[in-house]
Image (spheres, grey):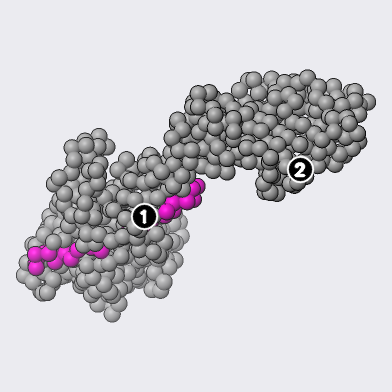
Amino acid sequence: MKRLIVMAMLLTLVSSSCAAQRGHWKPTTRQYRSPQGFVQVSLGGVEQTVVAGSRNIRLTWLNFSNHYDWGQDITSIRLRVETDGDVVNWLHDFSLYTDDGRQLRTTNDPDADIAAGVDREYGWVQFDLDPDGIPQFIDSDGKLSLYVTFGVSPGINDNTSIKAVLHLRQITFKPVDRRPARITPARRLVGPVVTVLEKGHLSISKKVDTPNHSLLPGSTNGITAMRLNLLAIHENIWLETLPVYFGKLNDGGPDQVRLLSIYRDAELIIQNEPTMMDNVSDAVFDYLRRTGRDDIIARIEAGYIPTNASGGIDLGSRSIFLPQDEVVTLTIKVDTSDSNQRLGSIGESGQGFNLYIPGEEIIAKGELSGRTVEVVDEASSSDFHLFRSVPYVATNDLLSSGGVPGGTIAAGIEQIKPLYAFGITADSSGDLGLGRLSFAVRADNVGLGNLQVIDQLGQVIGEGFVAENPDGEFILDDDTVVVVDFFEPYTVPAGTTKVLTLVADIECTQANGCASSNSEGSVLSVQLLGDPAFPELLPGTYNEVAGQSWFIWTDFTWTPVLQIAHEDVLTMPQWTNGYRVMTFIGNTLPPRSTPVTFLR
């Protein structure tokens, strides 16, 4: 029976060896035998990638299983360490540990032969165990696991691979009754491969919760413009310089921002003012052209240009520590400029910017390798456009109170029936004026007339009319578009919310097929309309914007004092549409809101 067991284990050995020769590393097993039993040994572990300068790298596990009728005491272990890509003397500090992390003392220097390997890609690591140290005794039918660690010096060639090899008779045991464990002929054991890189890598990407394209209110502090994920790969990394470029939208750029701040969690890392730079190197501009960023005209700097002419934020003593394999998130916030064009402000309504961080200009160094690391990818923010103030809309379905629930169409005539309610909030940075609102209305087998918008006091502030295209057909598929132009721009004071309601007279009679017994059913649905794009002129006069917009508003940037009382309120270039207006929950106002529906 024992002979059958031994033969089966030898067959397993041959199978493992063949798999290894096919290029897939697997733990290999050998047996040290005597007529009364054997000791089974295997090398284990996982393949890994480290960087030059790393210490305490786990090279391999040594697993022992004693199949003697008596215990075995290990006295020495000798491994052959092989490299591929550079000589072996870059390696050092070979140590042997128990599986619970206790280092074993030796009576010799395990590094002696490795240190002499200045012209070869192999060396011997000898562990002569100190008899007065921790005994490595394997009980009868017992098991024992040890592991080997080492370090690698900076300067080793990139992509050098390292592995441990256990040859025959390279493990010795203390004789028992003058009978040492004997080794039967077998092939060598090979451990997993450790690959050494010259330096680590830094990956950057825009975090998924980075704000979407939006409108920004002027004179406002601490607006989040971008959230950036940083991931240190293969080693801890110190981030030293972070270039932040400003893109130019609608002739805007960095003049729309007074101050840029970078935070790690709640900790402020750096603050800086955007500055124009005319002395950017040709290499930088070439990079921008290759990446399609030729509209970038400025960046943040800290009063100096590094030797690579990349500029950027010099984090200096506040360099950001990035732990290996942990995602670190940086938040970039902006303080916006004032946009009061009547007073000649630096910021201008309708102009915009975005932020761009080119990875290849980031300066970051590996903690172990001491080298400047390669940065993978790049990151761009969304697009932002500045206005003196901006609106926030609560569509009917987002109103906490006062919304129209929909319901049933009653027979007969219902006057001033609420069809759709919505809230308009002006940012605290300034008052707003509403010039137009539009609704998609579907009215099947029901009469509809006298459409009006009323305020919270029930006062009529605008009347609706049906919009038609030049061919006389209704716009937006089969829906009627009802446009409500206000009698005069409706003012929403800064920091306040106004709830407005579309009302109409509803007629449900036999004449229009609504109240008859053989009616096929009546449907009335209403949706608030947004805009799918900016107007051609941003901003423009009311008439310039009105020809291509459903939702029209102004921030009074040219008439901030008299506002609607100013004789030129409609003819000054201070009007825009509903594109990228935000809702109360932080989403962009859709081209069509959720409908309010009435049925019969």
Magenta residues (range): 321-345
Q: Earlier in the sequence, mark 1 or mark 2?
A: 2
Instruction: Determine whether, in the image, residue 34 is placed left or right of residue 157.
Output: right
Quadrant for residue 563, please give it. Answer: bottom left
Q: Amino acid at mark 1?
A: Ser
In this view of the protein, which residue sits in the foreground, 268 or 553?
268
Determine the secondary structure under disc 2: loop
Task: Assess whether residue 426 is covered by the magenta stretch.
Answer: no
Q: Position of residue 309 (x, y in %)?
A: 22, 43
What is the residue that sits farthest to the right in this orientation?
Answer: 1
Which disc, if any, is residue 131? 2
The residue shown at (15%, 45%) is 279
Please name the residue that numbered disc 1 is placed on: 319
Q: Is residue 504 visible?
A: no
Q: Nearer the viewer, residue 404 or 164?
A: 164
Q: Is residue 317 above or below residue 97?
A: below
Instruction: Mark 1 and mark 2 in contact? Answer it, CB < 8 Å.
Output: no
Residue plotted at (48% across, 30% down)? 159
Classed neighbour count for the residue bearing mark 1: other residues with Cα under 10 Å, few (<14), some (14–19), many (≥20): some
Q: Amino acid at mark 2?
A: Pro
For residue 297, side relative to residue 182 (left or right): left
Q: Which residue lies at the image location 44% right of the left edge and 62% below the top edge?
A: 600
| Image vertical order of residue 533 relative to residue 157, above or below | below
Front one among 443 and 578? 578
